Image (cartoon, rainbow, N blue to C red):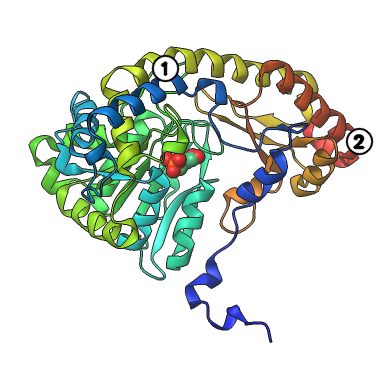
C-alpha cells in the first residue's frame, strides 16, 4: 500500500504553495520560448573570468579554510567589506551587524522564523515579491496589503488603528512593479515605525541597477541618519541585500543588516537552518567585492539592461498601446503591464502556445487578486526578441480582448 504522506506532513505545510514562477520557468527554459517570466540576470553579464581567477587564487592559497566549515555569521572579511559599503553611506554599522545568508531569500525566511507569529499582521505592498509571501505563509500571518502608485506604497493608506508586526518594503524598482518608493515616503515610513513601534523589513536587491533618475538613500540609511550613534540600540530596520543581481545568483550570497540584538536572533535561526552559507562562495564574493569586479561590472550591466528596458517600453507602445497601462521602471528587471478586462492566466496558456512566457499578476498577491496584470522581465532577452515577444502578445490581445474591455481601455 502506498504511503499517505499527507497524514504525516506538519499542519504548517497547509500554507505552502509551489511558486508559479519556479514551475513556469521549467517551461520557459525551452530554447524556442521568448521568456519574460524569470527574474534572472542576463547570462552574458556573469563575471565568469573573474570568478575563475578568484577560484584559482583561493584554492591555491587558502583551500584549507575556503573548503572548511566556517562561522554561522559568515566569512569575517566579507562581513567587514559589506559593512564598509554601508558605513560609506552613513550607517554606523560594523561586521557585527552583518549576517551572510544563502541569498536574500534566506533572509526573508529568517524574518519569518524569528519575527512572525501566527495571526501577526504583516503590512505589504500590493503587489509584492512572491518569495516573501512564500517564505512567510507557513508562519500563518495575516497579510495586509496597501496600494501603490507611481511613488510606491501609499504610506498614508496604512491602517494604523490595529497594531502590526512589520512593514515589508521593496524600495527600489520593486519586484514585480518596477516602481520605487519616493524619498519622502521612505522618511514617512521610518517616522511611523518609530512612533508606532513596528519593524521595517527593507528588501533591496536592485539599487545598483539604475538606468535613469537619481539614487535615493536606503530606508536603513534614512533611519541611521535620524538616530546617529543610537542606531544600534534604537534601530528598527532589518535590511536585506544580495550579490545575485550584480555578481551571480548561483553563488547564493546575500546578507542581513540589523542592530546586534536582532542580528543575534537571526544568527541563532541560521544555526538551525544550515550552520552557515557556503564558505567557498563567500570567499569568491569577498574577492570580487574587494578586487573591484562588482563595481567595474556596473556600467556594463546598466547599459545592457537600459537598452532592454527601452526596447520593451518601445515595443509595448507599438504593440499594446491603449489596450493596457504599464509602469516605467528607472531600474531593476521588471515592468508591470495591466490589461483591463483580461484574465492573464488564460492569456498565458495562449501565449505559451506561441512560445511567449510571462508571470500572471495574481502570483504577487496573497489572495489571488491582480489577474488583470502581468510581470514582464526585460533583462534576459536581447532587444530583437523583446520586440518579437511583445509583438506576439499584442497580436494575441487583438484576438482575445473582449470588445467591452477594449472600449473601456481605449
Ligand atoms: C525582491 C527580492 N527579494 C529577494 C530575492 C531573492 O534573491 P536571492 O535569494 O537570489 O538573493 C529576489 C529575487 O528575485 C527579489 O526580487
Please tell me which residue lies in front, 235 or 70.
Answer: 70
Q: Position of residue 20 (x, y in %)?
A: 64, 51
User: Label 2 crowding class (10 Å Cα cut-off): few <14, some 14-19, many 20+?
Assistant: few
Marks 1 and 2: CB-CB under 8 Å?
A: no
Q: Quadrant of the N terminus?
A: bottom right
Please tell me which residue lies in front, 188 or 208.
Answer: 208
Residue holding disc 1: 298
The image quadrant that residue 104 belongs to is top left
Q: Residue furthest bottom?
A: 1
Q: Residue drawn 80% across and 40% down?
A: 352
Q: Residue drawn 78% across and 22% down?
A: 388
User: Label 1 crowding class (10 Å Cα cut-off): few <14, some 14-19, many 20+?
Assistant: some
Which label's residue is closer to the chain start, 1 or 2? 1
Tell me if 265 is positioned left or right of 376 in this view: left
Residue holding disc 2: 399
State which mark lies toward you, 1 or 2: 1
Q: Residue drawn 25% across and 50% down?
A: 69
Q: CA distance from mark 1 to mark 2?
A: 41 Å
Q: Position of residue 103 (x, y in %)?
A: 40, 43
Please tell me which residue lies in front, 30 or 153.
Answer: 30
Q: Position of residue 205 (x, y in %)?
A: 41, 34
Question: SS class of the residue under badge 1?
Answer: helix
63 vs 10: above or below: above
Res. 141 visible in picture: yes
Amino acid at each position: 500500500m502506498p504511503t499517505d504522506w499527507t497524514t504525516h506532513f506538519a499542519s504548517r505545510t497547509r500554507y505552502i504553495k509551489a511558486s508559479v514562477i519556479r514551475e513556469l520557468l521549467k517551461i520557459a527554459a525551452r530554447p524556442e520560448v521568448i521568456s519574460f517570466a524569470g527574474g534572472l540576470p542576463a547570462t552574458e553579464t556573469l563575471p565568469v573570468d573573474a570568478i575563475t581567477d578568484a577560484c584559482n587564487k583561493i584554492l591555491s592559497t587558502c583551500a584549507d579554510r575556503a573548503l572548511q566549515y566556517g562561522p554561522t555569521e559568515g566569512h569575517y572579511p566579507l562581513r567587514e567589506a559589506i559593512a564598509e559599503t554601508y558605513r560609506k553611506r552613513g550607517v554606523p554599522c560594523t561586521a557585527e551587524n552583518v549576517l551572510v545568508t544563502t541569498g536574500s531569500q534566506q533572509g526573508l525566511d529568517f524574518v519569518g522564523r524569528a519575527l512572525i507569529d501566527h495571526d501577526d499582521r504583516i503590512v505589504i505592498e500590493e503587489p509584492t515579491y512572491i518569495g516573501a509571501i512564500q517564505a512567510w505563509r507557513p508562519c500563518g500571518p495575516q497579510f495586509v496589503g496597501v496600494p501603490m502608485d507611481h511613488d510606491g506604497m501609499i504610506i498614508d493608506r496604512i491602517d494604523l488603528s490595529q497594531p502590526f508586526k512589520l512593514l515589508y518594503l521593496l524600495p527600489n524598482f520593486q519586484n514585480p512593479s518596477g516602481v520605487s518608493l519616493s524619498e519622502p515616503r521612505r522618511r514617512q515610513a521610518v517616522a511611523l515605525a518609530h512612533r508606532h513601534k513596528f519593524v521595517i523589513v527593507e528588501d533591496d536587491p536592485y539599487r545598483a541597477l539604475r538606468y535613469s533618475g537619481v539614487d535615493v538613500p536606503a530606508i536603513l540609511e534614512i533611519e541611521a541618519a535620524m538616530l546617529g550613534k543610537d542606531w544600534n540600540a534604537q534601530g528598527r530596520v532589518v535590511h536585506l541585500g544580495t550579490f545575485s543581481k550584480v555578481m551571480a545568483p548561483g553563488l547564493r550570497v546575500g546578507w542581513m543588516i540589523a542592530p546586534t540584538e536582532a542580528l543575534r536572533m537571526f544568527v541563532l535561526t541560521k544555526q538551525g537552518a544550515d550552520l552557515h552559507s557556503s564558505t567557498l562562495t563567500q570567499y569568491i564574493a569577498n574577492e570580487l567585492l574587494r578586487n573591484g569586479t562588482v563595481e567595474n561590472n556596473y556600467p556594463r550591466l546598466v547599459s545592457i539592461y537600459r537598452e532592454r528596458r527601452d526596447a520593451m517600453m518601445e515595443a509595448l507602445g507599438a504593440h499594446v498601446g491603449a489596450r493596457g497601462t504599464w509602469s516605467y521602471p528607472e531600474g531593476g528587471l521588471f515592468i508591470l503591464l495591466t490589461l483591463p478586462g483580461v484574465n492573464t492566466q488564460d492569456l498565458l496558456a495562449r501565449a505559451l502556445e506561441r512560445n511567449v512566457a510571462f508571470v500572471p499578476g495574481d502570483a504577487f498577491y496573497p489572495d489571488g487578486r491582480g489577474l488583470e496584470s502581468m510581470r514582464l522581465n526585460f533583462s534576459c532577452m536581447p532587444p530583437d526578441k523583446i520586440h518579437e515577444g511583445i509583438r506576439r502578445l499584442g497580436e494575441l490581445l487583438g484576438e482575445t480582448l473582449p470588445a467591452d474591455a477594449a472600449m473601456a481601455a481605449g
